[in-house]
Image (spheres, rainbow, N blue to C red):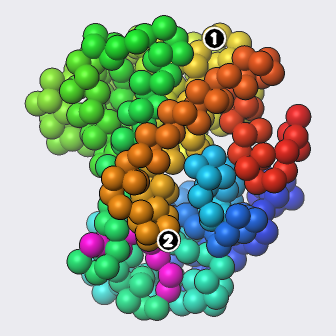
Amino acid sequence: SIEDVITGWDGSLVATRYDRETGAFFVVAIHSRERGPAAGGTRVKQYDSYADAVTDATRLAGAMTLKMAAADLPMGGGKAVIALPAPRRELADDHWRRILELHAENLKTLGGSYWTGPDLGTSSADMDVVCGFGAPAFGRSEAAGGSGSSAPATALGVHVAIVASAAEVGIDDLAGCRIAVQGLGAVGMEVVELARKDGAHLIVTDIDPVLCERAAALGAEVVPPDAILGVESDVFSPCAVGGVIDVDVARTIRTRAVVGSANNVLTDTAAGDELARRGIVLAPDFVASGGGAIHLIGREVLGWTAEEVATHVEGIADTLREVFVRSRVGGISHDHAARDLADERLGRAGSRV
Ligand code: HCI
C-alpha cells in the first residue's frame, strides 16, 4: 500500500503537485544528498494511480543514490515523475510545454537540491526547455550547451558489464554467446550493435515492430515480447521496464547471467537471492546502468572529455568484478554485495550486514 511505501522509504523528501489545468501530477523524490546534490532523470508516462507514481519515484530515487555511489560520483540520488493524463503523443505541443514549465517551477521551488535529466519519456530537447525555464537539468542537447544523450554511454557500460559477467560464468569470448535483449530503445539497440560486433547471437524483442525490424536487419533473431523470458540464453539483458524478475521468474529463467540497463529489475531482494541460489550471475542494475550518470556528471560537473568518460564507463567492469569477489568471500548474493559496496561508498559501512 502507499502507506507501506511512505513509511518504508529511507529517503529525505518527496514533493508532489497536481495541476488541474494540465491534468499532470508531479512527483519529485529526493533520496539522498550525502554525496552531493540529488540527481536523476524525469520519468514521464501514464500511471494507474498517483500512488503508483509516488511509489515509482521513491524507488527510482533510492536506486539513483546507489548508482551514484557505486560509480563514485559526487552526487546524491533523486528522481522525478510526471504522471500524464493521456499518452504523451496525444498531448498538443503547448500542453506538453506548459507541463515542462510547471515541472521547472517545482524544481526551482526546491532550490537546486535536485538536478534532473532525461529518463524514460523525456529527451535532451525536453531538458533544453526545462533549463530554458530556469531549472537545473543535465543532458541538454549539445547545441544548447549540454552533453547530449547519455544512451551511448549507458550502452557501453552495459556492454562491458556483459563481458565481465560472461567471464564470471566461464565465457571468455562473446562470439557465439546467446544474448537475449528485452527492449530496443536507444540503449537496447546499441547493446545489440556492440554485442553483434563481438560475434554474439542476439535474440531480441520490443513492443514496437519497427524497432524489431531494425534489429533483425542487424542480424538479430526477433521473438514476441511475452516470449523473451522463456528464451534460453547465456545472458539476459533487460533494457526496457523494471520489475521483470520476481521470485517466480528467477526460479524459471533459463540464462546464466542477468545484465541490463533497466532500473529496479528485481521486484525484491528475494528475487536476487533466488538467482544467487541457482548460480545465475547478476550484474546489479545500479552498477551495470551507471554509464549514463557517468556521462552526464562526468561531462557536466567534473569536466571530463569524452575519452575520460569512456574510461570511467569501462571501469564498471572493475566494480562488477569487485562485487563478484565480495559475493564469493561473503557468501552473499551479487545484489547484496553491490548494496554493501555502495553503502561503503556512502560512508555507511556494514549497515546492511
Ligand atoms: C539514470 O541513470 O537512471 C539517470 C541518469 C541521470 C543521472 C543524473 C542526472 C539525471 C539523469
**What residue sits 64% from the left and 19% below the top?**
275
In the image, residue 71 lies at what x, y percent?
A: 58, 49
Instruction: Tell me the magenta residue range.
Output: 135-142
Dot 2 corresponds to which residue?
A: 301
In the image, residue 18 lies at what x, y percent?
A: 60, 81
Given the image, on which type of amino acid does mark 1 rest?
A: Gly
**What residue sits 31% from the left and 86% below the top?**
94
| Residue 136 among those drawn in magenta | yes
Task: Tell me the element at label 2.
Answer: loop
| Residue 300 among those drawn in magenta | no
In the image, residue 279 sits, relative to residue 74, either above or below, namely above
- How far apart marks 1 and 2 lie (CA) works out to 39 Å
Res. 40 image quadrant: bottom right
In the image, residue 304 lies at what x, y percent?
A: 41, 63
Most frequent secondary structure within the magenta stretch: loop
- The disc at residue 258 is none
Of residues 348 and 206, the one drawn nearer to the viewer in this rendering: 348
In the image, residue 268 sits, relative to residue 110, either above or below, namely above
**What residue sits 23% from the left and 34% below the top?**
193
**What residue sits 42% from the left and 84% below the top?**
131
**Left or right of residue 190, residue 19 in this image:** right
Given the image, on which type of amino acid does mark 2 rest?
A: Val
In the image, residue 313 lies at what x, y percent?
A: 44, 45
* Some atom of ligand 1 lies within 8 Å of the CB belonging to the residue at label 2: no
Of residues 215 and 116, the one drawn nearer to the viewer in this rendering: 116
Dot 1 corresponds to which residue?
A: 279
Crowdedness near tag 1: few (<14), some (14–19) or many (≥20) residues, C-alpha within 10 Å: few
CB under 8 Å between callouts 1 and 2? no
